[in-house]
Image: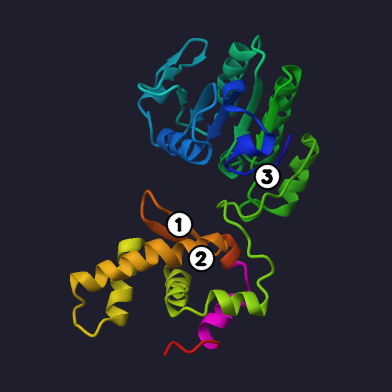
Amino acid sequence: MERNVEDDVGDRFGTKADATEILVVSAERSVMDVVDDWRASRGTLPATFGLITFGEFGRSAARETTADGPSRQSLPGRDVTVTAMSDPGNLRRLGTAATLYLDDWADSDRETVVYVDALDPFIEANGVESTFQFLHLLVQTVTQLGATLAVRADPSRIDERTINTLQPLFDAVTDPGPADGGTTPPALDTDTIHELLRNPRRRFVLRSLFQDESVGLATLAERLARRESSSEPPTDDDQRRAFTALASVHVPRLAEAGLVVFDRSDERVSLSDAARGAERLEGYLNGSFDDR
């Protein structure tokens, strides 16, 4: 059992899609977000995929429950079974929903993983003591069935004392790196930073993100075109060239270094936790380079 895990749970546990049952519990992400993220990282869904969500999908369905507990429904066109719920403060109902999935899968010979993708919303809604009791019961259920429980606890959103309180419930604690899935730059040594930020467009991207944290790629391209173009306003060609340069070269390079998170589907760029936590980086951007 683990506390911090990557979004790609399959890689963490070495599971194969056709031999795996995955139950994701998500307080904030919608069904589409969870499924699309899984497909993007794994290429395919596991053999059996269950989702308990408190996200935007199926809020009306969350009120449709049976006498025995929350109802489940299959998502049309996808191999996904969904339980939509509305109140993360109702841990008893959440426990019932999780147990229903595990009971259904108890007789299979597949590996079963239960993944809570963010613990802090449940702590905020219930307090540490109630969340501890809930996890304790869930650990017992999972252990009895020979399954694995993975819980992601973001240290930037949960204080160290709370994490230390919950830690004894688990067999292992791992640190996969930034919560956004990015890769931390090797050491952010002077040579690495200078090489990476030698290009003024990359510095421009980071400066923009230190100000706004998350910006659409089209907006970044428009700002860059205004900065570089001799025309006022910049032409459509100027903006297309800026967009192409950012999308194909500079933003991917910054993402590879772990300084930004690049969501290609939404064409959006965000500052990573690694960049935000690099004390020297903003100083380099403000004074160590000449943009001429």
User: Under tag 1, what secondary structure?
Assistant: strand
Indicate the position of residue 154 as horizontal and vertical percent values.
63, 50
Q: CA distance from mark 3 to mark 1?
A: 22 Å
- Residue placed under numbered mark 2 in the picture: 254
Position of the N terminus, as image quadrant, is: top right
Occupied quadrant, residue 116: top right
Occupied quadrant, residue 74: top left
Q: Residue at x 62, y 67 (%)?
A: 277
Q: Residue at x 77, y 35 (%)?
A: 169
Q: Residues within 10 Å of mark 2 (few under 14, many from 20)?
A: many
The amino acid on which the numbered mark 3 sits, given as a three-letter code, is: Asn
Indicate the position of residue 244 as horizontal and vertical percent values.
33, 64
Marks 3/2 in contact by CB < 8 Å: the verdict is: no
Q: How many marks?
A: 3
Mark 2 or mark 1: whose residue is earlier in sequence: 2
- Residue 279 sits inside the magenta stretch: yes
Compared with 91, 101 (above or below) is above
- Residue 198 sits inside the magenta stretch: no
The amino acid on which the numbered mark 2 sits, given as a three-letter code, is: Leu
Residue 187 or residue 127, whichever sits in front: 187
Specify the label residue 262 is tagged with.
Answer: 1
Mark 3 or mark 2: whose residue is earlier in sequence: 3
- Residue placed under numbered mark 3 in the picture: 4
